[in-house]
Image (spheres, rainbow, N blue to C red):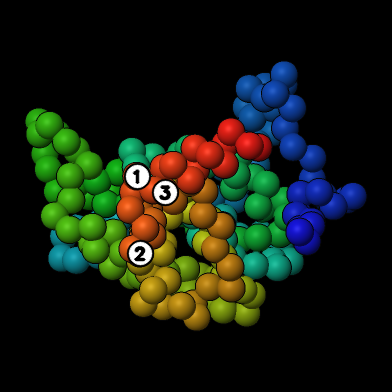
Amino acid sequence: MKKIQLNMQRKNAYPCIEDIKYKEYMKKNVEPYLDEKKESGFYERTAGKYLYYENYMAEDAVGTVIVSHGFTECAQKYKEVIYYFLKEHYHVFLIDHRGHGRSVRENSENDFSLTHINSFMDYVEDFRGFIEEIVVAKAGTAVPFYIYAHSMGGAISILYLEKHPDSFTKAILSSPMLQLNFGSVKDWQVQMIVGAARRVR
């Protein structure tokens, strides 16, 4: 198997934050740095429906990373990740998906599920609009685009990439929300194979 060396493993790469000093370092170093770099706003996806976004522009950028967060998450959760990408000279763009964070909600505050949406494809169209209207307008296309997506954000990203396969150079999918299609192999057969593989590991 070919070894892949990540940028964070380079000799001169910015070091990861130590667990023992995490809270203090985030407060004293990371958050003030991000506050200086952060631009935020709302874009009107459809009439009267606004989606919140943030962007952070890196110096001497080598690429642009678009973060697609998971279910019940929002841009607020990704401060440490944004920091690492910026230190590695990547522009970073994030959108609060519909029904999440500071973006429009289909339901009112009194409804059972604040994250309810009418169609999953609304997420995909929101994401497309965000890339075309905000990311390209602010970052241009001089450097490659990358997706960094988690869980539900992974499913959104994959559906987007099915329609626009050439818009990103690479995609990083962390635990994407997917159901695998095993063709003619039954689910119980897959479970038996996986169980056997675990035992002989």
Q: Quadrant of the C terminus?
A: top right
| Location of residue 187 with respect to 93 vertically, above or below | above
User: Tag 1 or tag 2, which sits nearer the N-term?
Assistant: 2
Residue that label 2 marks: 183
C-alpha span from label 2 to label 1: 13 Å
Q: Circle 1 sits on which residue?
A: 188
Task: Report the amino acid beneath label 3.
Answer: Val
For the residue labelled by badge 1, is the local secondary structure a helix, a strand or a loop? helix
Tell me residue 138's x, y (percent): 50, 70
24 is higher (above) or lower (below) than 136: above
Amino acid type shown at disc 1: Trp
Disc ID at residue 190: 3
Question: Which mark is on residue 3?
Answer: none
Of labels 2 and 3, earlier in sequence is 2
Asked if the residues shown at circle 3 and circle 1 are in contact, with their CB atoms under 8 angstroms apart, the answer is: yes
Q: CA distance from mark 3 to mark 1?
A: 5 Å
- Residue 154 versus residue 79: which sits nearer the camera? 154
Q: Is residue 105 above or below residue 195?
A: below
Residue 7 point in image, percent of width and height:
76, 55
Helix, strand or loop under label 3 = helix
Nearer to us in this view, 153 or 80:
153
Q: Which residue: 33% across, 63% down?
A: 184
The spot of residue 88 in percent (x, y) is 73, 55
Mark 2, Cα crowd under 10 Å, few <14 / some 14-19 / many 20+, is few
Spatial distance from mark 2 to mark 3, Cα to Cα?
A: 11 Å
